[in-house]
Amino acid sequence: MISRSRSLSVLSVLVLVVAGCSMSSRFPSDAGKAGDDGTGMLKAFLTQIADPNSPMPEMFGAEPAFESALRSSPDKVTPLRPLYLKLKSASGNTQRRKVAEEMLQKLSESSTG
């Protein structure tokens, strides 16, 4: 019984590592390299959510993307917090896509305005 639970634990850790590696390859690893103000990872994540032709990413990626952007550009990202909470609590893909589009719109307005 112990070896079975240990095997399941090891398998779970491996799945998390593989999922994390494949997810991290979709985003810029360094916001500075993205050629922007530190919101590159958040924009990439929101773009993937908003694109109806793209598979819906796992929502656990939202928090690191949002927190990283918040540290880099608090003046641009802090006003998005209510939408971010709405995105995390959205019940379906259609609602997530709408919220992501709205967040992208507000990010682009804050960049140009």
Image: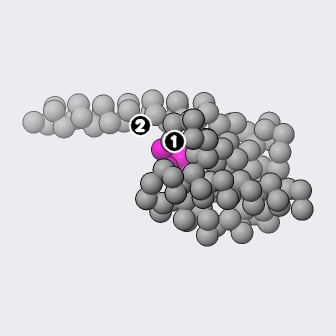
Residues in magenta, as a range: 58-63
Residue type at mark 1: give it. Answer: Pro
Could you say which disc has been placed on residue 66 in the image?
none
Viewer-side residue, 12 vs 90: 90
- The quarter of the picture where the C terminus appears is bottom right
Per the picture, the main secondary structure of the magenta-coloured stretch is helix
Could you say which disc has been placed on residue 57 in the image?
1
Per the image, label 1 sits on a secondary structure element best described as loop
Magenta run includes residue 43: no
Per the image, label 2 sits on a secondary structure element best described as helix
Viewer-side residue, 51 vs 73: 51
Residue 17 visible to the viewer: yes
Residue type at mark 2: give it. Answer: Leu
Q: Which of disc 1 and disc 2 is earlier in sequence?
A: 2
Rendered location of residue 103, percent (x, y): 68, 58
- The quarter of the picture where the N terminus appears is top left
Could you say which disc has been placed on residue 16 in the image?
2
